[in-house]
Image (tube, rainbow, N blue to C red):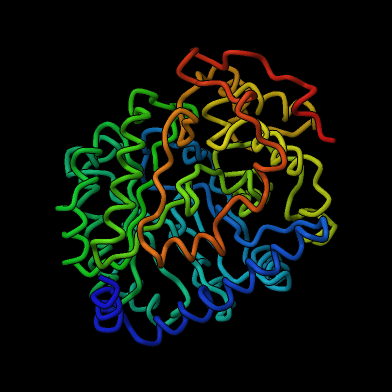
């Protein structure tokens, strides 16, 4: 399987792009993780990976979207992006995730990509704006991989994404990337309407036949103004999805990304462990994309490294999240997010200014963590080694987490008990 994957990458992707991937994301990514570990030992903090939502606008209206796509367009300008990326690079970072809205609606996107040939960017996109010309420019840049979201069959895609003809437009953008030998991935937010269609060997084989190099199965998060909780997967389905990914990693010549488990199959939250935080289109720094409360900004007069290192709000979030669950705190314990924002006077970072009301109205949902289930460890030695080095809890849960603080979200419409201030106060 590993030999087949290597042959695919060498034959189906531009060699120059592979070198950029290996150096900017691989070798330098290892260095960024090492620097992160060293900082933690010194009691300092700066996340080794940043999610950056560069624009709020989008041409689609997806179910469960938390982004203010209907509001006046706002984007992070090139100068602000360059300052932020330059500071992160000085801290050792080299890999950045660009989100929206739809990132390709940011007219200066390529100015940003081209200004940092020594960094690597993963662009989360619906693919609709990737013409052949755009794909050729992506190939010329070399330091970017589009991650194109496919949310189901033609009928399901239209339903999930609020527009007709979504699937064909997405597949056309995907094919433009593949025709130009761009390193390309496909992601899916698994939910009740696409679970049986896309979490299958047939779909994975189809991606391989097309030339897709990696895939990422997210789990649908019922958040935002129209959360559509009926789409959420059951705990059993989430476990089946985990097992599918672990099995396919040993069987198929395609890379499988995941964000919620370590090498031993223990659940984790990348924001709670400090691996990543999120910057929204207004420059506000949030714990993660779906927790839309902020205390600090990239536009702060202080250097960005000082902002991250000295943020009591973000530190309290990490301690609170790690102290109550190895899963997703915004799903399992929305009451704790409300208490956290109140404790620090964190502002509603949305344009709609309804984030607090949404959290207060939110019901609790199961996430990837289930203390009663046996963890599903990695079978693949390659994934196991990579995760042991770079993707684990960095001691976050061993320091703060106790099963007695975890509340099964299935036991109540909301959290079964209120936030215990003695547990979540910043110490």
Quarter the C terminus occupies: top right
Q: Is residue 393 above or below residue 316?
A: below
Query: x, y percentage for residue 167?
Result: 22, 49
Which residue shows up at 53% across the image and 67% down it?
A: 108
Q: Tell me where residue 237 sits by quadrant.
A: top left
Q: Is residue 425 left or right of residue 10?
A: right
Residue 304 shows up from this direction: no
Number of marks in picture: 0
Q: Is residue 399 or residue 237 the one in the foreground?
A: 399
Looking at the rendering, which quadrant does residue 356 occupy? Answer: top right
Against 154, is 234 above or below?
above
Given residues 395 and 67, the one toward you in this image is 395
* Residue found 52% across the figure and 47% down from its top: 56
The residue most toward the front is 374
Whether 230 is drawn above or below 82: the answer is above
* Residue 15 x/y as whole percent: 35, 86
| Quadrant in which the N terminus appears | bottom left
Q: Residue at x 82, y 55 (%)?
A: 43
Looking at the image, can residue 391 be seen? yes
Report which quarter residue 347 is drawn in.
top right
Return the x and y of residue 141 as percentages of the image width and height. 45, 80
Instruction: Please state which of residues 394 and 415 is positioned toward the viewer in this rendering.
Output: 394
Q: Residue at x 16, y 67 (%)?
A: 209
Measured as percent of width and height from the top left, residue 164 is found at 22, 42
* Left or right relative to 204: residue 136: right
């Amino acid at each position: 399987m590993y030999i087949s994957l290597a042959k695919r990458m060498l034959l189906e992707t531009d060699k120059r792009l592979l070198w950029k991937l290996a150096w900017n994301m691989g070798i330098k990514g290892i260095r960024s993780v090492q620097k992160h570990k060293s900082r933690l030992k010194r009691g300092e903090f700066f996340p080794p990976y940043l999610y950056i939502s560069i624009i709020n606008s989008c041409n689609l209206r997806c179910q469960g979207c938390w982004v203010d796509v209907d509001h006046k367009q706002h984007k992070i300008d090139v100068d602000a992006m360059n300052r932020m990326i330059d500071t992160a690079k000085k801290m050792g970072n080299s890999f950045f995730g660009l989100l929206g809205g739809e990132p390709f609606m940011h007219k200066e996107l390529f100015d940003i990509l081209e200004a940092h040939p020594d960094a690597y960017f993963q662009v989360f996109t619906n693919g609709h704006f990737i013409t052949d010309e755009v794909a050729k420019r992506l190939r010329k840049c070399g330091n970017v991989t589009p991650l194109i979201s496919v949310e189901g069959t033609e009928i399901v895609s239209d339903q999930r994404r609020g527009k007709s003809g979504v699937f064909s437009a997405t597949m056309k953008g995907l094919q433009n990337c593949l025709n130009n030998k761009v390193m390309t991935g496909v992601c899916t937010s698994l939910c009740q309407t696409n679970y049986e269609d896309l979490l299958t060997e047939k779909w994975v084989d189809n991606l391989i036949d097309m030339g897709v190099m990696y895939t990422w199965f997210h789990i649908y998060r019922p958040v935002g103004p129209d959360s559509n909780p009926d789409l959420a997967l059951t705990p059993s389905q989430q476990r089946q999805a985990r097992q599918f990914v672990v099995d396919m990693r040993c069987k198929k010549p395609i890379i499988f990304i995941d964000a919620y488990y370590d090498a031993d199959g223990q659940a984790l939250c990348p924001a709670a462990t400090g691996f990543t935080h999120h910057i929204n289109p207004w420059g506000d720094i949030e714990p993660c994309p779906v927790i839309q409360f902020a205390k600090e900004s990239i536009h702060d007069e202080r250097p960005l490294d000082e902002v991250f290192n000295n943020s009591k709000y973000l530190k309290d979030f990490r301690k609170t999240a790690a102290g109550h669950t190895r899963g997703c705190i915004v799903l399992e314990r929305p009451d704790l997010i409300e208490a956290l924002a109140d404790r620090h006077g964190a502002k509603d970072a949305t344009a709609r200014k309804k984030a607090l009301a949404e959290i207060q109205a939110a019901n609790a949902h199961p996430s990837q963590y289930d203390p009663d289930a046996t963890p599903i460890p990695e079978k693949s030695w390659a994934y196991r080694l990579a995760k042991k080095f770079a993707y684990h809890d960095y001691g976050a849960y061993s320091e703060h987490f106790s099963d007695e603080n975890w509340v099964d979200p299935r036991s109540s419409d909301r959290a079964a008990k209120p936030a215990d201030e003695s547990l979540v106060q910043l110490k």
